[in-house]
Image: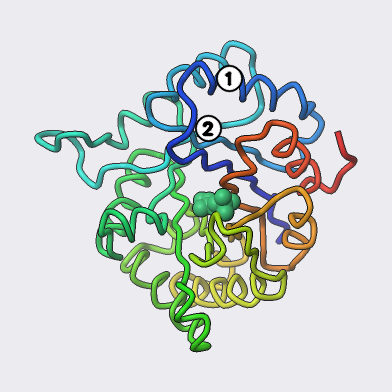
Amino acid sequence: MARKPLIAGNWKMNLNHFEAIALVQKIAFSLPDKYFDKVDVTVLPPFTDIRSVQTLVEGDKLLLTYGAQDVSAHDSGAFTGEISGSMLAKLGCTFVVVGHSERRTLHGEDNDTVLAKTKAALKNGLTPIVCIGEGLNIREAGEHVAYNVEQLRGSLAGLSAEDVAKVVIAYEPVWAIGTGRVASASDAQEVCAAVRAALGELATPAVASTVRVLYGGSVNAKNVGEIVGQSDVDGALVGGASLKADEFATLSAIAAGGPLP
Ligand SMILES: O=C(CO)COP(=O)(O)O
């Protein structure tokens, strides 16, 4: 079954709400509506920008969507500093990133936490973009496929096939994030294909054939074409290049199959 590519811009901790509005306006201007038949485009700003992005997207009826970079595993209550899935849903978010390697590494999130956050997203009608990815030592030891499959299983453990059908997976090798060192297209394909096979076992092959599996790590307008050209890679989770409107629009257009805007 044909899967519509998804280009997701993870802004990380960059841009205040004024800057967010300017960037979304520029992306929308650079990427005419016709592209959205062939690619889904979403931006994932910091929490403090989301209300402003919502106002712009709804007010101007933009076709791009938006989401958040994290969600609490809890519904509400005494969790200082956390943001719940229902709060994000109320702001019209479509997606939420869970288990980004920066959260796994810098904030000690393990697969159980990622699973709890994935469930919190699903419970609130948000599409979780569940991130997995190996460090350099694992890649160099040649254990990357098994490692990623294990992380996937742990992060989705016990979900029904119906719920697995609602997630997006992002394979982001840690050594390729923000380093300029992009995995080769065949490296991306190797792990994304293994992810799809594992999804087939966790749910069913029919479900696995519908789930979008993204690649992330130093994606830009120059390399996105080859990466999303792989049969099991259905788009990209883009960091640095998502902060540049022209480049993000161009790489989204390439994922749509062109022409360039
Ligand atoms: O972590 C990433 C997206 O979530 C990738 O970041 P870069 O594209 O900056 O390498």
Q: Looking at the image, which residue is at 64% across and 13% down? A: 60
| Residue beneath disc 2 | 66
> Taking 232 as reference, is 107 left or right?
left
- Is 162 placed above or below 239 here? below
Q: Position of residue 228 (x, y in %)?
A: 73, 59
Q: Looking at the image, which residue is at 56% across and 35% down? A: 43
Gap between marks 2 and 1 measured at Cα: 9 Å
Query: Who is closer to the viewer here, 177 or 80?
Result: 177
Q: Position of residue 170 (x, y in %)?
A: 53, 59
Q: Looking at the image, which residue is at 54% across and 21% down? A: 19
Q: Looking at the image, which residue is at 71% across and 61% down? A: 1
**Mark 1 close to ligand 1, CB under 8 Å:** no
Q: Where is residue 44 in the image (x, y as percent from the top left)?
A: 50, 37
Query: Who is closer to the viewer here, 227 or 6?
Result: 227
Q: Residues within 10 Å of mark 1 (few under 14, many from 20)?
A: many
Most extreme residue toward the top, as rendered?
59
Q: Where is residue 241 in the image (x, y as percent from the top left)?
A: 64, 43
Q: What amino acid is labelled 1 in the image?
A: Val
Could you tell which of marks 2 and 1 lies nearer the N-terminus? Answer: 1
| Residue beneath disc 1 | 57
Q: What secondary structure is marked by label 1?
A: helix
Contact (Cβ within 8 Å) of mark 2 with mark 1: yes
